Image (cartoon, rainbow, N blue to C red):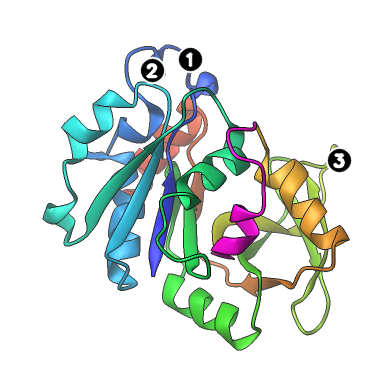
Amino acid sequence: MKAVLLAGGRGTRMGSLTDETPKPLLQVGGRLLIERAIEKLARAGISDVIISTGYRAEQFDDALGDGSQWGVHFSYSVEPSPLGTGGAMVLAARTFTSPDEDIVVVNADLISDHDVHAQVAHHHRHRADVALHVRHVDDARRYGVVEFADDSRVVSFVEKPERPQPAWINAGTYVVRSDILLDLAENTPLSWEREIMPQLLANGSRVFAFQQDGYLRDVGTPVDLSAAESEGR
């Protein structure tokens, strides 16, 4: 399998920390933030990783090289202008040699200890178009709320509700059939969370939730970065 690491955002909530450095290349505990996601994919047996970049894209090759130090192979997909999470995934998918591959997609600023290998197995077991990792939180306002049936099929997806509520939330790792992405317009700004996922559900696509709790830190702000440091991540 191949994986796409989404690493192209400006990281504006980081303030001055990302004026000169892309957020995934910030240091956490003496290592680059993106390294956690790379190591996670390598442990799951994924050796072909496409890094989707945009903001200060030239720094990634210098910092990461070809991936051999992690036992994986990197290629790079560079957004010509900001395309959003969905647009970046579509652009990266154009580099694939096969139109029917299953792809693991991970946000590069995500630190999570969930089992990617088990999520892939869940995707195959349900013959899913998309299988997304979900976990339970007490306050879902920072996340997308995912509702699903007893068989784990997703019935609704609501990005960042206004009121605090306990819920199962989108934890930022997906297994996606590549033809789902190849059917979308190229070089068009798209949000995976706000546009593509609701569209897939409306079209009757087979979207399933992979439920697994555990450590999760979406490193979006300096407070999150400090928390990851203090938690030893």
| Residue at x 60% of width, y 39% of height | 186
- Callout 3: helix, strand or loop? loop
Q: Is residue 187 magenta?
A: yes
Instruction: Please provide percent x and percent y for residue 11.
Output: 49, 25
- The region drawn magenta spans 176-188
Judging depth in this view, the residue of 193 and 166 nearest the camera is 193
* Cα–Cα span, label 2 and label 1: 6 Å
Q: Farthest residue to the left: give it.
A: 69
| Left or right for 65, reference 89 | left
**Contact between labelled residues 1 and 2, with CB atoms less than 8 Å apart:** yes
- Callout 2: helix, strand or loop? helix
Q: Name the kind of residue labelled 2 in the image.
A: Leu
Front disc: 1 or 3: 1
Q: Quadrant location of residue 65?
A: top left
Instruction: Please provide percent x and percent y for residue 82.
Output: 55, 25
* Cα–Cα span, label 3 and label 2: 30 Å
* Cα–Cα span, label 1 and label 3: 26 Å
- Callout 1: helix, strand or loop? helix
The earlier-in-sequence mark between 3 and 2 is 2
Query: Would you name the residue on which mark 1 appears?
Result: 15
Instruction: Please provide percent x and percent y for residue 214.
Output: 51, 65
The earlier-in-sequence mark between 1 and 3 is 1
The disc at residue 163 is: 3
Q: Is residue 218 magenta?
A: no
Judging depth in this view, the residue of 179 and 153 nearest the camera is 179
How packed is label 2: few (under 14 Cα within 10 Å), some, or many (20 or more)? some
| Residue at x 37% of width, y 35% of height | 24
The disc at residue 17 is: 2
Q: Name the kind of residue labelled 3 in the image.
A: Arg
Q: Quadrant location of residue 206?
A: bottom right
- Is 76 situated above or below 120? above
